[in-house]
Every structure is written in structure tokens, then in C-alpha cells.
Amino acid sequence: MSQAAGTEGAVDAGDRDATDNGNSPGIGCEQSAVKSRQSSMFRDRFKALFQGLHCDSDMENEESLTPDALFRPGRNAFLSRKRTPGCEANVFKYLLRAAEAGHTPAFAYFGFCFEAGVGTQVDVSQALSWYTKGSTEGDPFAHYMLAHCYYDGVGVEKDAKRAFDLCIKAAEGGDLEAQFMVSEFYMFGEVMPYDPVKAFDWLQKQLKVA
């Protein structure tokens, strides 16, 4: 998700009374627009991950590698800006082995392979299962990915409150995108009451690291 996208269409705090709890005329339409915008922001992050897919060719002696050593090239594939032939199959292979070995940080990335069809067929139920498993283990990125599922209704019924709770967990665990999304929730008064102070606090945390 592009950080620049987070500033588009932002509401000026001066245009809204801090005591407004969503009862003013037009708030329903505004919140509907916010939900659509935040949903697209969640999707933008996944699109960026997928479009950046890249990895090295098969590693030597991979049978002797630790789960973390297998996980790192799979994760790095999503962070690189280059694409190479056969990459998706390698990414899936590395993440599969790391996830099956119980390496918690690999769970959400492996789940993403099923959601986006990276090296395998799209399988939303598998994606949700791995996100949930990672979230249960306390992985911040898994919290965030599961939040996306609840916010966008991917494999589950939409539940903005559940999405917010998961975003808070991810944000507190240091996930930068989650920190930005929590700021958005407070800024636009969705789920939680409008609170520009908390919105700014979470945005500051994100910007200090980003």
C-alpha cells in the first residue's frame, strides 16, 4: 500500500466538530466513502506485493536449510522490484517448507500465495486458515492480513470491528501499514469514535519508522 495513498481525500479536522459521533447529516455517505477507500487501500498493499514478485534461482543445498533460511527468500520475493521466470513456483516451495516446519513468520506470506494464486491455485479458505494460524501465534503481519479478510469479506462475513481489533494488534506489534490503517480508523470515525489526537499519534508512530 502506497503511503502517498493515505493522504488522498483526507478530512480537515477543522471541517468536523470533535464532538461529532456520526449523527450529523451526510455522515453516512462519508463513512460509506471511507469504507470503500480503506478497502482499496488494503488491496493496494497486496497488489504491490504481487507486482514486485522476484526471487533468486533455486538455492544450493536447500535441503539442509533452516525454516528461517527458507522463509527469507520467499519473503524477500515480495519486497523486491524485479521479476524472474519461475519465481512464483520457487516462492511457493520455500514458503511451503517454512510454514510446514512451523515457522510462524512464514504463515501469512504462505497464506497470501493462496489468496493471490502465487505458485498455486487461488484458495481463499487456505489463505484464511494460514492467516488465522499466524494471527493465533501473534504474528503482526498475519494480524494485518486477517484484518483485511474481515474488512473486505474475504472468506468471512465483513466485520469492521473485528478488522479494527486485528489492526490494533498488528500496529502494536510494529506493522507499519497497520499503524497507518489504525490512524485512518480514528481519523474517519469508523468503528471507533472520531479522534484526531489518536489518529495523529498512530500516524506519528508509523512515520518515525517508515
Image (cartoon, helix red, strand yellow):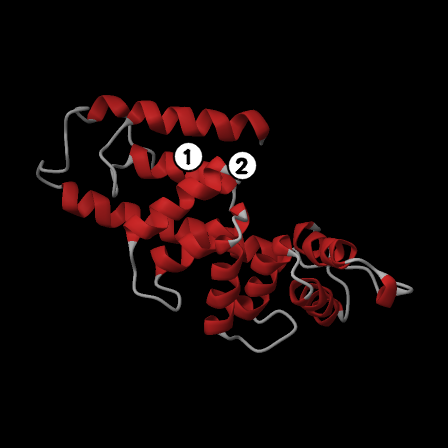
For the residues bearing labels 2 and 1, Cβ distance under 8 angstroms: no
- Residue in front for this viewpoint, 25 or 141: 141
- The residue at the point 29 percent across, 56 percent down is 159
Q: Nearer the viewer, mark 2 or mark 1?
A: 2
Q: Is residue 25 above or below residue 67?
A: above
Mark 2 secondary-structure assignment: loop
- Indicate the amino acid at tag 1: Thr
- The residue at the point 25 percent across, 43 percent down is 191
- The residue at the point 24 percent across, 32 percent down is 194
- The residue at the point 77 percent across, 64 percent down is 84
Q: Count residues near mark 2 (Cα–Cα under 10 Å), then give few for <14, some for 14-19, many for 20+.
A: some
When asked about the image quadrant of residue 77, the answer is: bottom right
Q: Is residue 89 above or below residue 49?
A: below
Circle 1 is placed at which residue position?
A: 7
Percent x, y of residue 9? 34, 37
Q: Count residues near mark 1 (Cα–Cα under 10 Å), then give few for <14, some for 14-19, many for 20+.
A: few
Q: Is the C terminus in the top left, top right, bottom left or bottom right quadrant?
A: top right
Q: Is residue 147 left or right of residue 66?
A: left
- Indicate the amino acid at tag 2: Gly
Residue furthest toward the bottom?
Answer: 121
Circle 2 is placed at which residue position?
A: 174
Q: Is residue 140 above or below residue 55?
A: above
Q: Is residue 43 above or below residue 60?
A: above
Percent x, y of residue 81? 70, 51
Q: Is residue 81 left or right of residue 169?
A: right
Mark 1 secondary-structure assignment: helix
